[in-house]
Amino acid sequence: MQASPVRLRRDDTDVDVVVIGGGVNGVGVARDASQRGLRVALFERNDLAFGASGNSSGMIHGGPRYLTNDPHVTETSCRDSGHIQAIAPHLLFRIPFLAPVERSARSRVMFTLMDAFFEAYDRYQPFKRGKRHARLSADELRQLEPGLAGDLMGGFSMDEWGIDGARLCVANAVDAMERGAKVYVGHTVERVERREDTGAVVAVRYRDRHTGAGGRLRTSVVINATGAWSSITAALGGLPPTASRVRPGKGIHIVYDRRLTSYAIMGQTIDGRQIFMCPWENVTVIGTTDDDFYGDLDGVRANSEEVRYLVQGIARVFPAIRNARAIGTYAGVRPTLHAYGPSEDELSRDHQIIDHAVHGAPGLFSMIGGKLASYRLFSEEMADVLAKHFGIGLRCATHVTSLPGGDATVDPFALAERAGIDAVAARRLVYRHGSRALHVEERMKARPREAVAVCPCEPVTEAEVRYTVRHELARTVDDVSRRTRLGLGACGGMRCAARCGQIVASERGLPPREGMRQAINFLERQALTRVVALGPEQARQEALAIASVRSELGLMGDDDLATAPAWRQIAQSEPGEQSAHSRAQGEVVCPDP
Amino acid sequence: MPRSVIVIGSGVAGTAAAWGARGRGSKVVLVSAGAGASAFAGGAVDDVPWEQRTRAAHALGLEAHATAAKLPGALLEFVGALGVWDVPAARGCYLATMAGRVRPARGRDRALLDLEALGRGGRVLLPRVSRPGWDADALARALGDDPFAKALKLQFEAVDAPVLRFDEERRVTDADLAARHDDPARLAWLGESLRSAVAEGTGVAAVLLGPWLGLGLGRADKLAALVGLPVGEALIGAGSPAGLRFEVARDALFKAGGIEVISRRVRAVGVAGGDASGGTARFAVSLEEKDASLRADAVVLATGGVSGGGVIYTPAEHGAGADLPSGGRVPFALSLTAPVRLGDGRGALEATSSLFGPALDTVAWPTGSRQSLLEAVGVQCTGIRAAHGLFAAGDAIAARPRTVLEAAATGWHAGVEAASTG
């Protein structure tokens, strides 16, 4: 890991560019700008991929949905999907879709229209190495997926790619850091300081949300890549919120305990929206809704009405879904381009860069809208603006430079044998980390006991948990879960959350009780996301989990303990403890400025 | 003629009910469909939930825990007859959990290490064992950091001492590993191994292991005798061999007490027809895969709550397929048909005014001292009485504390009442 020696463009600043937001666009532009030799600092209020990037449908699809309204969005998405595939091949997996057509009075016309539609989409498929669509008879459909119901007249196949959005963000952030960028997670920007006369950006004031420590970093350029938070961020720079306006659209997904089908299946909601059920990594995901959102962006959760609306739509084509076991939900808020009037689905998925010089704030830019599938292109466009701003001639190379782990393939079976872990664990490890899985393997070789599985559902080894804390900016059990899917399986973290908390605490040199507190928080939050999709099979597991956590971990937060005078006394009488595992100085990837 | 009592369910509550009714001279038949929450339990024997105990310690000071509430004699007698638990008459105990906490409990499975009994200021050794969930170093650090451990002045230390004999034992389940320690030779080997580890240190008070000390009773005590120090397990929340040990003790109790056990699922408890002139049993209990039904004067429902499988979550939408659900309904049901109502402690459950199911958004996790809906749902009772001659016990009762001693107490009480009420 070496930081390329970069020269600051101006001597009255600490960094050239401050990026606000650790979603895919933020880390994407941080990576691109760092690659072009700019000195970048990125601030993320929560965690990388905390918002829409980590809670998307997990596909870099071209969005045939947008073909009618925004054909160029489809094209750019498909082109960029191809690039993402080239730079991070380990993170992609093929998802073949089936789109059944129900027999009705106008189904013949419908079928022809859809055929033409997919024909049009086929033109973009080569950009992302996708296969052409195929017309299927009702029998062929049922042969491919026997669970399909309804009076079908036929259907189509379509090819898309799945991706783990959180892993994509982490890979970009790690690459940016390795090129010299500083990434501050859990740090919120409180104010963007501007000159009184010219309005130009001079610095950002930030605060570590955990320790409360604040700081100031001088910069001449600030990029607001905060997605749905965009208007709030603009206001921090003294602009009216309308200067960086999005129309936040909440989307939820339901997760089932395993891959229920081999193909993704398209369905329609009661109000005629396209939804899907899709085998994704080792679970099945149903999505998604699109509703205007007015709530707290830091605590977005699905509710049972949204869940029932989606299940109803899927049950029409795949009735067995009602008996399947839902093990969770997740929700995010899209930063769609603003328009007043159209329904959520009609809104453009295009992206746009706002140069706030027009609002009297030179140096402040907002990245608005966009899609996971075209984040790289969006970042490139933003970095082009930066290059022009700083007068550097370097062209974008993010589409030809591999993301961390994407440079070479690793044979999971050989790795399994070498590291003494089972083949499934190795496969999942290689999926998440690509060639960097070898770094995790090194840890396991050096300390064989780290090869023990912490989370048996996913599975995740102790070595990987430690690796994410040390090299991927994970600070809490939640962060580890976002990066590894630890605790998101059928047991809901009942087995692994406490253990993961211990490891995180030991790796970060925190007292074990802090790890325990993180574990309880994680379990509680996960329970709230699971319950809105609760079904009969999950109910008993849920009750067992409550009983188990009650007896082993306790349901009281540590804050409860801290408020009691007797406890405080004990806590004060004990000297602070230093963990044997606190990390060596040189390994700190993100030192305080 | 002695009264006949049918007990449904063979967890802690059902066992206590059968024992109580048999003790009053009734003819007892116990029907069980298999493992429930008691078989999964971790071995902590609580009277009130742990949080409640800890809150009391906040308010009254740490030593408040040392003076535990006295238990009724009949309950202690049942605990003694069962033999798998230790519930000290006048004090509580402290258990180490696999999650790294030191927690108070009223009693414990005898194989669990009681930290309270160690006195103050000793060292507890944790052998390093390469198994998932057992990281002796991290666990020792976490336990040592716990306020209760500090109050007890206990230190926890990871040590190297062989516990596994074969490589494949790194991957077998806790119960499988525990079963291997039922072999006296193996237990002796482990005792030898721990003894040499203990001999190397000074001030060692006890040895803490994972939940691996036998499915039979008394293995931990035997091991302690071999080592010359207390040796015991840490508590694991679910799936502990403690549940299996309870089952072993329970079966022995049934055998000794002449309690007939039928391993079947009960389909329905109905009021039996017949003349009122006397002699006819009040209830008819029909079993799955059996035409004839059993008859009894009284029935005890000890079928458990949602976690035990006695109460089932049945929203209207489940199984509705592509169509609309058939109608609004009560979202929970007893696993069998019986003339009782379900409640959640705030009244009887009603059909939801929704074709799909209840609003779920707020029922997931217990908040403060309030139980979650999934914990609270059970049969509506006055005390233990659900209907005339029909009793409920343990988790089957709505909104009672979900603890072992509560199950035993309500079970015993229900059994006695069933045996005596006319």
Image: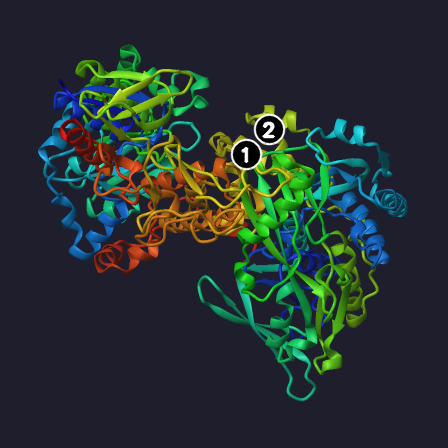
Number of numbered discs = 2
Q: Is residue B275 visible?
A: yes
Marks 1 and 2, the one that precedes in the sequence: 2
- Along the horizontal axis of the image, is A225 left or right of B169? right
Q: Quadrant of the N terminus of chain B?
A: top left
In percent of the image, x 54 and y 30: which residue is there? A445
- At 54% from the left and 55% from the top, the residue drawn is A301
Pick whichever, A517 or B391, lies toward us. Answer: B391
Residue placed under numbered mark 2 in the picture: A424
Callouts 1 and 2 close, C-beta under 8 Å: yes
Q: Horizontal and vertical percent for residue A236?
A: 59, 75
Mark 1 — residue?
A459
Position of residue B97 relative to residue B366, above or below, is above
Q: Position of residue A146 (x, y in %)?
A: 71, 28
In the rendered image of this protein, does residue B69 appear above or below residue B287?
Answer: below
> Can I make out residue A553 in this image?
no
Q: Amino acid at mark 2?
A: Val
Image quarter hosting the C terminus of chain B: top left
Q: Are marks 1 and 2 on the same chain?
A: yes
